[in-house]
Image (cartoon, grey):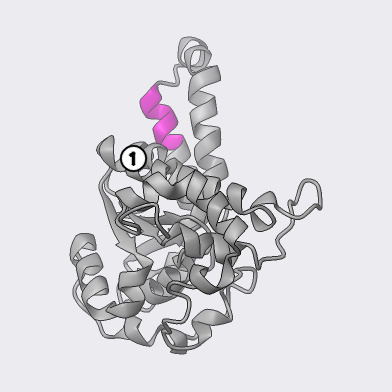
Amino acid sequence: MISRPIFIGGMPRSGTTLMRAMIDRHPNIACGPELRVIPALASFTTQTRQFCGDNLQAYYGLTPAHLNDAFSALIGSFLEPYRAARGKARIAEKTPANVLHFTELNELFPDADFVHIIRDGRDVAASLLTMDWTDARTGAPMAMTRDPAIAAATWVRQVTAGLDAETAGVRIHKLHYENLVRDPRETLGALFEFLGERWSDDPLSFHLGEHIRAGVAEASADQIARPLYLQSVGRWRRDLSPAAKAAVKKQAGALLKKLDYADSDDW
């Protein structure tokens, strides 16, 4: 079994790719382009337990512990080659949808660390509406890139999943995108303390990493090839139309206030 894996998740367009690039520069941690299979494998694990667990135990002697061992070994087999190739002690995996499966992954990997990236949902919606992503099943544009209400509702769903996992006892470090770009040294320092890793200056020069462009399928691959910038913080003020702001407020207003991104509905 892989030792002390790190799973990174959050809403798309929240800075998860930036975090991947930074953490990969740490001397002790390898974090490659998003693997994308972890959420599917976690879902398959849950479904197997729910729909086949009793039969597997009754007729094949496969206890819940056996299933945990099998699925953790399967997921580990996807992660271990990259860790070994980089020659680092730990592996981290960043796929935004990981955040929907932190609870399942914690059951499979009790020694894992989890990092939840959170960004102002209004900025997330503004960014999503500029994306040209398509649904792989239908070939049609993804609804959250066309409809601000769906973008905001998806943000609420994924952020809430991470918050709920933390409430359920999963050991999670919440990291806000805005803090990361405004004060990367302090924000990364808190992260590495949580991970039990020593401080390194290398992640601050993430844009110089040799593996920086490896994630060409990641929408932010070009942006992380340059130093940190603040222009995207508060972009919703200039990029969201009044109708889009109203739609986002209806879906996400309560959570924005809970997370201190808004102190009222007057925005």
Residue at point 19% right, 73% down? 198
Q: Is residue 78 above or below residue 163?
A: below
Relative to 200, is 100 on the left or the right? right
Q: Position of residue 69 (x, y in %)?
A: 40, 36
Image point (72%, 65%), residue name = 132
Furthest residue toward front: 266
**Residue 77 visible in image:** yes
Image position, residue 52 (x, y; %):
54, 18
Above/below status of 210 relative to 77: below
Stretch in magenta: 64-70
Q: Please state which amino acid type lies under the numbered disc 1.
A: Ala
Is residue 199 or residue 90 the one in the foreground? 199
Can you name the residue that lies furthest to the right here? Answer: 139
Q: Residue at x 44, y 69 (%)?
A: 20
Crowd band around label 1 with a 10 angstrom C-alpha radius: few (<14), some (14–19), many (20+): some
> For residue 179, which quarter of the picture?
bottom left
What residue would you read off at disc 1? 165
In which quadrant will I find the C terminus? Answer: bottom left
The residue drawn where x is 27% and y is 38% is 167
Give percent across and percent down for residue 55. Answer: 52, 12
Is residue 211 visible in the rendered structure shown here? no
| Residue 115: percent from left, percent from top | 34, 57
